[in-house]
Image: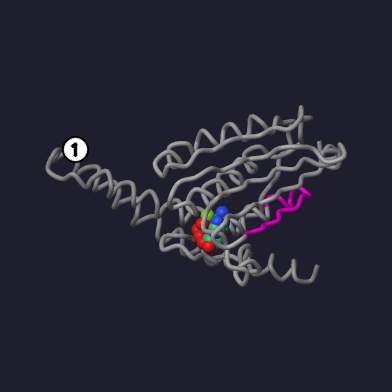
Amino acid sequence: MHEELLQKEKLAVIGQMSTAIGHEIRNPLSSLKGFIQLQRESYPNTNDFYPIMIEEVDRINSIVSDLMDLGKPRVITFEKSNIEEIIAYTTSITQQQAQGKGVTIETITEEPLPPIYCDEKQLKQVFINLIKNAIEAMSEGGRIKIKLKTILGQKLYVAIEDEGCGIPEENIPNLVEPFFTTKKEGTGLGLMVSNQIIKDHKGVLNIKSISEKGTTVEILLPLQQSKAFF
Ligand code: ADP
Ligand code: MG
């Protein structure tokens, strides 16, 4: 519990700093984007790099937004939801990235699933983060399996299994730390935010991995308990 409080305080400080710096970065960034767009309209067909320039500015913007989000208290709005629809939505969002890397995504539902009470937007964010990580781990293509079932009618179990590079054992304790990344262009925020969202739902996120073989991220969410919030 003490650890958790410390983690929360650490995030709050990072969040406050990021919010302050973020505002300062956003203003010049939006004028930069404006000028790129203006330039593109004034001199079309002279520069193939306009779309890339705009995309990259947008990417900085979204990193800054993620950082600024750390400081905000996240309000959860529980609503009655269908987990299969949430998963279908997230796989459709990530489909293009998967296809580009020769990765297929398969959802396996072992039984009819009851509704869950959750913040849909936030759970979508969790699954997008996890599926993106899985895709990014598979440089030579392969299969991602998303398994769904209930446990004793009490919990919803979701597992995301990939056949990617795996995670060295010594990295496992750092995965949910802010800014831990092994990627050249990573932010190291995806798992931290996802873990926090699952905890806010009174659930558990667990990561198992075998180097070179693949990774399984398991999520357990209470079916009954969350109804109390509704
Ligand atoms: P980012 O994706 O920006 O690096 P994350 O918090 O999403 O940040 O992930 C942190 C790190 O955990 C990654 O850089 C990677 O080393 C490791 N990781 C997460 N998911 C996987 C996975 N499915 N397979 C292999 N490594 C992973
Ligand atoms: Mg990530």
Quadrant (top left/top right/bottom left/bottom right) for the C terminus: top right
Tell me the residue at 19%/41% (across/down). 40
Picture layout, residue 97 above or below residue 20:
above
Q: Is residue 165 left or right of residue 2?
A: left
Q: Residue 223, percent across and down? A: 82, 38
Crowding at dot 1, Cα within 10 Å, few <14 / some 14-19 / many 20+, comes out as few
Q: Residue 228, percent across and down? A: 86, 39
Pick whichever, 65 or 152, lies toward us: 152
Quadrant (top left/top right/bottom left/bottom right) for the N terminus: bottom right
Which image quadrant is residue 87 in? top right
Q: Is residue 144 left or right of residue 218?
A: left
Residue 219: say if magenta.
no
Pick whichever, 133 or 200, lies toward us: 133
Q: Residue 5, percent across and down? A: 75, 67
| Residue tagged 1 | 41
Tell me the residue at 60%/56% (across/down). 191
Q: Which residues are magenta?
A: 197-209
Q: Amino acid at mark 1?
A: Glu
Q: Residue 27, percent across and down? A: 37, 55
Residue 203: say if magenta.
yes
- The answer to whether residue 54 is visible is yes
Check disc 1 and report its element: helix, strand or loop: helix
Tell me the residue at 42%/60% (across/down). 185
Tell me the residue at 63%/43% (across/down). 122
The answer to whether mark 1 is within 8 Å of ligand 1 is: no
Picture layout, residue 216 above or below residue 108:
below
Number of marks present in the image shown: 1
Check the image and name the residue furthest to the front: 213
- The answer to whether residue 19 is visible is no
